[in-house]
Amino acid sequence: MTFKLILKYLLSAGIITLVSELVKRSDRLGALLAALPFVSIITLLWVHHESAPEVRAQKTADHMYYIFWYVLPTLPMFLLFPSFQRWWGFYGALGGSAVLTLILFALLRTITARFGIML
Protein backbone atom coordinates (compact mmCIF):
# COMPACT_ATOMS: atom_id res chain seq x y z
CA MET A 1 0.00 0.00 0.00
CA THR A 2 1.42 3.36 -0.96
CA PHE A 3 1.88 6.30 1.37
CA LYS A 4 -0.69 8.33 -0.60
CA LEU A 5 -3.35 5.69 -0.18
CA ILE A 6 -2.68 5.40 3.56
CA LEU A 7 -2.85 9.20 3.84
CA LYS A 8 -6.22 9.19 2.02
CA TYR A 9 -7.60 6.61 4.45
CA LEU A 10 -6.35 8.50 7.51
CA LEU A 11 -7.64 11.85 6.29
CA SER A 12 -11.08 10.41 5.50
CA ALA A 13 -11.31 8.60 8.83
CA GLY A 14 -10.11 11.71 10.64
CA ILE A 15 -12.85 13.89 9.16
CA ILE A 16 -15.58 11.38 9.97
CA THR A 17 -14.26 10.97 13.52
CA LEU A 18 -14.01 14.74 14.00
CA VAL A 19 -17.59 15.30 12.87
CA SER A 20 -19.01 12.44 14.96
CA GLU A 21 -17.19 13.67 18.06
CA LEU A 22 -18.29 17.24 17.45
CA VAL A 23 -21.94 16.16 17.13
CA LYS A 24 -21.72 14.84 20.71
CA ARG A 25 -20.98 18.37 21.88
CA SER A 26 -23.08 20.44 19.48
CA ASP A 27 -25.68 19.23 17.00
CA ARG A 28 -25.58 22.53 15.12
CA LEU A 29 -21.81 22.77 14.85
CA GLY A 30 -21.53 19.10 13.93
CA ALA A 31 -24.16 19.53 11.21
CA LEU A 32 -22.39 22.61 9.87
CA LEU A 33 -19.12 20.74 9.66
CA ALA A 34 -20.80 17.71 8.08
CA ALA A 35 -22.52 19.94 5.51
CA LEU A 36 -19.25 21.42 4.31
CA PRO A 37 -18.07 19.66 1.17
CA PHE A 38 -14.89 18.22 2.69
CA VAL A 39 -15.06 14.99 0.73
CA SER A 40 -15.57 16.88 -2.53
CA ILE A 41 -12.73 19.30 -1.84
CA ILE A 42 -10.32 16.59 -0.71
CA THR A 43 -11.21 14.45 -3.73
CA LEU A 44 -10.75 17.48 -5.97
CA LEU A 45 -7.28 18.03 -4.53
CA TRP A 46 -6.31 14.38 -5.06
CA VAL A 47 -7.66 14.37 -8.64
CA HIS A 48 -5.76 17.57 -9.37
CA HIS A 49 -2.48 16.27 -7.98
CA GLU A 50 -2.77 12.76 -9.40
CA SER A 51 -3.96 13.62 -12.92
CA ALA A 52 -1.67 14.22 -15.84
CA PRO A 53 -1.24 17.97 -16.48
CA GLU A 54 -2.90 17.78 -19.90
CA VAL A 55 -6.18 16.41 -18.44
CA ARG A 56 -6.08 17.98 -14.97
CA ALA A 57 -8.32 20.98 -15.70
CA GLN A 58 -10.95 18.88 -17.45
CA LYS A 59 -10.95 16.19 -14.74
CA THR A 60 -11.44 18.69 -11.92
CA ALA A 61 -14.08 20.66 -13.84
CA ASP A 62 -16.01 17.47 -14.65
CA HIS A 63 -15.77 16.37 -11.02
CA MET A 64 -17.32 19.60 -9.73
CA TYR A 65 -19.95 19.65 -12.48
CA TYR A 66 -21.21 16.17 -11.60
CA ILE A 67 -21.13 16.86 -7.86
CA PHE A 68 -23.51 19.76 -8.42
CA TRP A 69 -26.05 17.52 -10.15
CA TYR A 70 -25.60 14.54 -7.81
CA VAL A 71 -26.17 16.64 -4.69
CA LEU A 72 -29.66 17.72 -5.80
CA PRO A 73 -31.45 14.37 -5.31
CA THR A 74 -29.92 13.98 -1.85
CA LEU A 75 -31.30 17.23 -0.42
CA PRO A 76 -34.88 16.05 0.31
CA MET A 77 -33.45 13.21 2.41
CA PHE A 78 -32.18 15.70 4.97
CA LEU A 79 -35.63 17.21 5.40
CA LEU A 80 -37.55 13.93 5.41
CA PHE A 81 -35.23 11.77 7.54
CA PRO A 82 -36.68 13.03 10.88
CA SER A 83 -40.21 12.09 9.78
CA PHE A 84 -39.03 8.76 8.39
CA GLN A 85 -37.33 8.05 11.70
CA ARG A 86 -40.51 8.75 13.68
CA TRP A 87 -42.47 6.41 11.40
CA TRP A 88 -39.96 3.61 10.76
CA GLY A 89 -37.16 3.95 13.33
CA PHE A 90 -33.52 4.73 12.61
CA TYR A 91 -32.68 1.90 10.23
CA GLY A 92 -35.99 2.21 8.42
CA ALA A 93 -35.28 5.91 7.95
CA LEU A 94 -31.85 5.09 6.51
CA GLY A 95 -33.40 2.62 4.10
CA GLY A 96 -36.27 4.94 3.21
CA SER A 97 -33.83 7.79 2.63
CA ALA A 98 -31.70 5.60 0.37
CA VAL A 99 -34.74 4.52 -1.66
CA LEU A 100 -35.99 8.11 -1.90
CA THR A 101 -32.57 9.29 -3.09
CA LEU A 102 -32.39 6.56 -5.74
CA ILE A 103 -35.86 7.43 -7.02
CA LEU A 104 -35.03 11.13 -7.13
CA PHE A 105 -31.73 10.41 -8.85
CA ALA A 106 -33.54 8.40 -11.56
CA LEU A 107 -36.05 11.23 -11.93
CA LEU A 108 -33.25 13.80 -12.19
CA ARG A 109 -31.50 11.74 -14.89
CA THR A 110 -34.73 11.52 -16.86
CA ILE A 111 -35.44 15.25 -16.61
CA THR A 112 -31.89 16.42 -17.32
CA ALA A 113 -31.58 14.07 -20.31
CA ARG A 114 -34.41 15.99 -21.95
CA PHE A 115 -32.18 19.05 -21.79
CA GLY A 116 -29.11 17.26 -23.11
CA ILE A 117 -27.45 16.84 -19.70
CA MET A 118 -26.23 13.27 -19.41
CA LEU A 119 -25.64 12.09 -15.85
Image (cartoon, grey):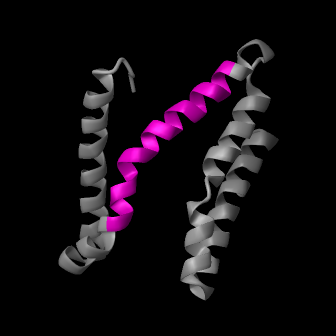
**Place of residue 114 in the rendered image (x, y in percent of width and height, measured from the top left):** 27, 21
**Place of residue 21 in the rendered image (x, y in percent of width and height, measured from the top left):** 63, 79
In the image as oriented, which residue stretches furthest toward the top? 54
Name the image quarter holding residue 86: bottom left
Q: Answer whether residue 69 is magenta in the image.
A: yes
In the image as oriented, which residue stretches furthest toward the bottom? 25
**On the picture, is 82 further left or further right than 22?**
left
Residue at 67 percent of width and 71 percent of height? 18
- Tell me how many marks there are: 0
In the image as oriented, which residue stretches furthest toward the left? 87
Pick the front one: 35 or 99 = 35
Residue at 50 percent of width and 32 percent of height? 66
**On the picture, is 62 further left or further right than 4?**
left
Pick the front one: 2 or 60 = 60
Residue at 68 percent of width and 45 percent of height? 41
Looking at the rendering, the stretch of residues picked out in magenta corresponds to 58-79
Q: Work out which quarter of the rendered image holds the C terminus and state it.
A: top left
* Above-or-below relation of 77 to 26: above
Q: Main secondary structure of the magenta part?
A: helix
Pick the front one: 43 or 116 = 116
**Place of residue 24 in the rendered image (x, y in percent of width and height, measured from the top left):** 58, 85
Pick the front one: 75 or 55 = 75
Q: Answer whether residue 78 is magenta in the image.
A: yes
Name the image quarter holding residue 20: bottom right
